[in-house]
Image (cartoon, coloured by chain):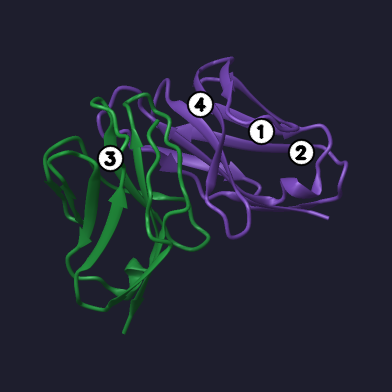
Amino acid sequence: DAKTTQPPSMDCAEGRAANLPCNHSTISGNEYVYWYRQIHSQGPQYIIHGLKNNETNEMASLIITEDRKSSTLILPHATLRDTAVYYCIVSSNTGKLIFGQGTTLQVKP
Amino acid sequence: SQTIHQWPATLVQPVGSPLSLECTVEGTSNPNLYWYRQAAGRGLQLLFYSIGIDQISSEVPQNLSASRPQDRQFILSSKKLLLSDSGFYLCAWSVLGQPSNEQFFGPGTRLTVL
């Protein structure tokens, strides 16, 4: 499975959009991009996934570059409850997910 | 609806003692099951992965073992705990073949080895 690179931490003002980048330059054609988040002392929570096209759901939007070497998770209106560690993972649909260090997002009032 | 249970929620064990953590899933059949460990301040490390009864893959060498005696039961064990086994142990399940590859995590067990 391809590796990902994320900034270790980011801050965002409450009510503003949070844009979390992820580099995955070695992604293979059959690998998806997955985003999970982990709020302190809880298990990770699935957010969104994509293959080639941009995706949007009730939680977030996922923007994948045309060459698929990077992506951005967008939380359109961040709240204090969005403070968490966000993990970007690339994986084929085998079931296994390899979590990296993620980005710690701090939403500030 | 599907639910996942883990117990105990917290555990304090002396070095050299045995360990048994249990995970059960309800409301689904033939799930993929996973054990992860998260050391303090670190990311999640995949320990074991199972696609069926008695079918378990070990992802990292260690003094832990896993068993799946029933379809929806996954057990993590050790004969002798080390200090380095301390951490937050999470069990998860998923359905193979779903494009979302969504894994559902249990509440976790916080293990402290003294």
In this rendering, the answer to whether A35 lies above or below A28 is: below
Quadrant of the rendered structure where residue A74 is?
Answer: bottom left
Q: Position of residue A63 (x, y in %)?
A: 16, 50
Residue hosting label 3: A33
Q: Residue B72 has which mark?
A: 4
Q: CA distance from mark 2 to mark 4?
A: 20 Å
Few, some or many C-alpha atoms within 10 Å of disc 3 (few <14, some 14-19, many ≥20)?
Answer: many
The chain letter under disc 3 is A
Query: Do the residues marked 1 and 3 share a common chain?
Result: no
Residue hosting label 1: B76
Instruction: Find chain B in the image and tell me its colour.
Output: purple
Q: CA distance from mark 1 to mark 4?
A: 14 Å
Q: CA distance from mark 3 to mark 2?
A: 35 Å
Q: CA distance from mark 3 to mark 4?
A: 28 Å
Residue hosting label 2: B19
* Tag 3: amino acid: Val
- Name the residue located 34 percent from the left edge and 70 percent from the top edge: A81
Locate the N terminus of chain B and report the quarter of the image it occupies: top left
